[in-house]
Image (cartoon, rainbow, N blue to C red):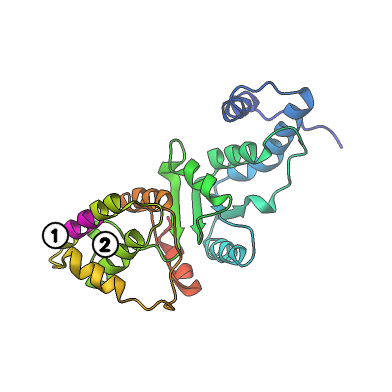
Amino acid sequence: MTDPGPPPNAAEIMESVNDTLQGLELEPRETSEILLFANRELPHLHTPEDSYFILGSYRDPYLRRLRIVQNELDKRIGTYPFLMADLPELDIDRLPVFRIRFTLLAAHADTIVAVYEQDAGGEVTELGKISTTPYFDKSYVLPRDYTWMTDQNLDTEADVIAAAATIYFNDDLDQATAEKELDSLLAAANKNDIRLTKSDVIDRLEEREDDEQAPVSYSWVHLNEFRLFELHNRCFAWSSQDDLRNIVDKVP
């Protein structure tokens, strides 16, 4: 088979790889493998179709939810939704290939959609990447059981109590920080004419049954990143698989 040669934007590709590897000097074979991957996969992202790079955990059962998102997006006309797991690996043992593949795919995809159900695993790294430039403006997060933290989404007392639970029961926060966050939450709720005091909220939280089924628990770092996306109207929460199918419609 004839060598297709380097892609026309090879210099741009290698510049982005150089940035993500912090200027690490590459061996000729490594450069060749990277350009081969780019030649094979990036043309799919440069067609009239809208490409969607789907992020999340590849472990079961979380992978099933990524497939739901992929299938829903695939129902649209002229779309190419894909997972990194479905693409060939880079045959480069020495280098952090995840960083390279992620950088190339995220830079060239039209939209990034990330599904979250836990606060561990590789999704943590991905969330940190897509919440910053240059990926933030084209990224959407779909966190399971996320409770709204901003005033435009606090419509009922139940919303406030759910949001308060993520603060009150969060082991990452000391007491002073938790109280400050609760005060901020209640101030936002009061703007929506929801009159609850801090003691009201704490009393109701303490009344929870020990065996009550808990929602997905996220670290405070996760919650802060989700809040950023929420403020930009690019955070869509879900609880069930049917919810997930429905909210995919909100992703442009």
**Residue 133 percent location from the top left of the image:** 43, 36
The residue shown at (74%, 32%) is 94
Quadrant of residue 19 within the rendered picture:
top right
Residue 192 in picture, x, y percent from top left? 15, 63
Mark 2 closeness class: few <14, some 14–19, many ≥20 residues within 10 Å: some
Three-letter code, disc 1: Lys
Image position of 177 with respect to 160: above or below = above
Q: Which residue position is annotated with label 1?
A: 191
Q: Position of residue 18 (x, y in %)?
A: 61, 25
- Judged from this view, the residue extending furthest toward the right is 1
* Direction front: furthest residue: 175
Q: Residue at horizontal 58%, vertical 52%?
A: 121
Compare marks 2 and 1 and give the one earlier in the sequence.
2
Quadrant of the rendered image containing residue 28: top right
Q: Which residue is mark 2?
A: 153
Q: Quadrant of the C terminus?
A: bottom left
Q: Main secondary structure of the magenta part?
A: helix
Mark 2, secondary structure of its residue? helix
The answer to whether 209 is drawn above or below residue 1 in the figure is: below
Residue 5, position in %: x, y? 76, 29
Q: Which residues are magenta?
A: 182-188
Which sits in the foreground, 37 or 201? 201
Residue at image x 55%, y 42%?
A: 106
Residue 166, above or below 125: below
Q: Amino acid at mark 2?
A: Asn
Q: Is residue 110 magenta?
A: no
User: Rounded to the nearest whole Å, what is the CA distance between mark 2 and mark 1?
Assistant: 11 Å
Left or right relative to 246: residue 148: left
In depth, the one of 143 and 161 nearer the eye is 161
Name the side, left or right, on which 100 lies relative to 91: left
